[in-house]
């Protein structure tokens, strides 16, 4: 049991939630109930879980000394010595090679996206994570690649405003992560540079300004996406009452009703970052804060109801 727990912590199972973004294209394209489409996206999610775990292992191997100086990361299996570097390398190689091989046999474009994701994270682990601004851009790019992978496997078009929303939200989460890391390490007896070199080039005020900027672009780009969403009638619609109403009440415009939920979600996340300094692990915040979980669930149900029912 201890070995299983160590394995789960090493591959960071809790962070697999980040790969849920591969489902975004199928939801907003109207293909959610198209036979065979969901299975392809679920398979893509599984492959990216394996590939992202190999990236986490690589990062932990390269950052073993920095993680030992971190108040939380020092408890990770590799940094704490519960998993040897040799075991980690073997596990990394198996996860990366199997994920890429299965991706190659699934779709050539999916394989290209997965390979690009792996290369990006290798460059990030070796170099980009130590360069301010580029470090958060690299994190955001990883999310964009996963969204593209989700669209490749079902061959759908992605609206430009939707992509900008993904980019803005990714940058918002990355900046919030950096700000919480800085706050967490500010009392670590001068070990900030050792734990995260790029943090020495940031200030709390600068990261706060970045967070505000990307918080605004996140909800604004989503609002524009919902406002400008083109008319779409997916198969299986059964509620036709809106055909009798004025153009003002066309179903295509009802996606705007979800904008207040996005604004609240952004504001709530900022509150957790600035007041409680909980942004160091975005996935943990998203899965532990009751208000945020409720908001995401209600938003998701509304999106599905508006696109597939109205």
Image (tube, helix red, strand yellow):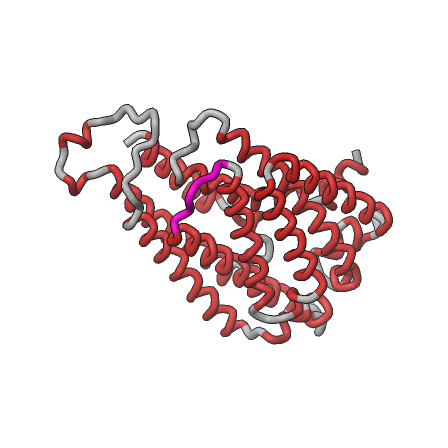
Q: Is residue 18 left or right of residue 126?
A: left
Percent x, y for residue 295? 41, 43
* 216 versus 118 height, above or below: below
The residue drawn where x is 21% and y is 38% is: 250
Q: In the image, what residue occupies the spot 55% across and 50% down?
A: 145
Q: Nearer the viewer, residue 156 or 263?
A: 156
Left or right of residue 273, residue 260 in this image? left
Q: Residue placed at 72% from the left, 40% from the top? A: 8
Residue 104 visible somewhere in the drawing: yes
Would you identify the image quadrant in which residue 62 lies? bottom right
Image vertical order of residue 19 relative to residue 238, above or below: below
Does the magenta run of residues contain 182? no
Above-or-below relation of 124 to 305:
below
> On the picture, is 273 further left or further right than 98?
left
* Quadrant occupied by the C terminus: top left
Q: Name the residue furthest front.
A: 108
Decide if residue 264 is in sight here: no
Magenta residue span: 154-159
């Amino acid at each position: 049991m201890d070995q299983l727990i160590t394995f789960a912590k090493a591959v960071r199972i809790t962070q697999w939630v980040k790969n849920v973004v591969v489902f975004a294209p199928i939801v907003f394209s109207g293909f959610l109930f198209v036979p065979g489409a969901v299975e392809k996206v679920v398979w893509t999610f599984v492959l990216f879980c394996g590939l992202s775990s190999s990236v986490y292992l690589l990062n932990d191997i390269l950052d073993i000394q920095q993680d030992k100086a971190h108040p939380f990361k020092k408890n990770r299996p590799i940094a704490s010595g519960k998993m040897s570097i040799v075991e980690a390398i073997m596990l990394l190689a198996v996860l990366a090679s199997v994920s890429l091989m299965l991706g190659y046999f699934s779709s050539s474009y999916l394989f290209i996206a997965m390979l690009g994701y792996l290369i990006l994270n290798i460059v990030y682990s070796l170099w980009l994570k130590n360069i301010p601004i580029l470090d958060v851009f690299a994190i955001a790019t990883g999310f964009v690649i996963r969204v593209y992978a989700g669209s490749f496997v079902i061959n759908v078009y992605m609206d430009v405003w939707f992509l900008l929303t993904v980019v803005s939200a990714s940058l918002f989460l990355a900046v919030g992560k950096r700000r919480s890391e800085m706050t967490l390490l500010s009392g670590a007896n001068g070990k900030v540079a050792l734990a995260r070199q790029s943090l020495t080039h940031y200030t709390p005020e600068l990261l706060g300004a970045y967070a505000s900027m990307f918080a605004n672009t996140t909800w604004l780009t989503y609002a524009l996406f919902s406002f400008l969403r083109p008319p779409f009638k997916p198969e299986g619609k059964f509620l036709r009452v809106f055909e009798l109403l004025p153009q003002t009440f066309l179903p295509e415009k009802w996606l705007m009703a979800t904008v207040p939920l996005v604004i609240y979600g952004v504001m709530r996340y900022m509150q957790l970052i600035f007041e409680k300094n909980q942004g160091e692990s975005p996935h943990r915040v998203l899965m532990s804060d009751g208000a945020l979980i409720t908001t995401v669930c209600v938003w998701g149900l509304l999106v599905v109801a508006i696109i597939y029912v109205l």
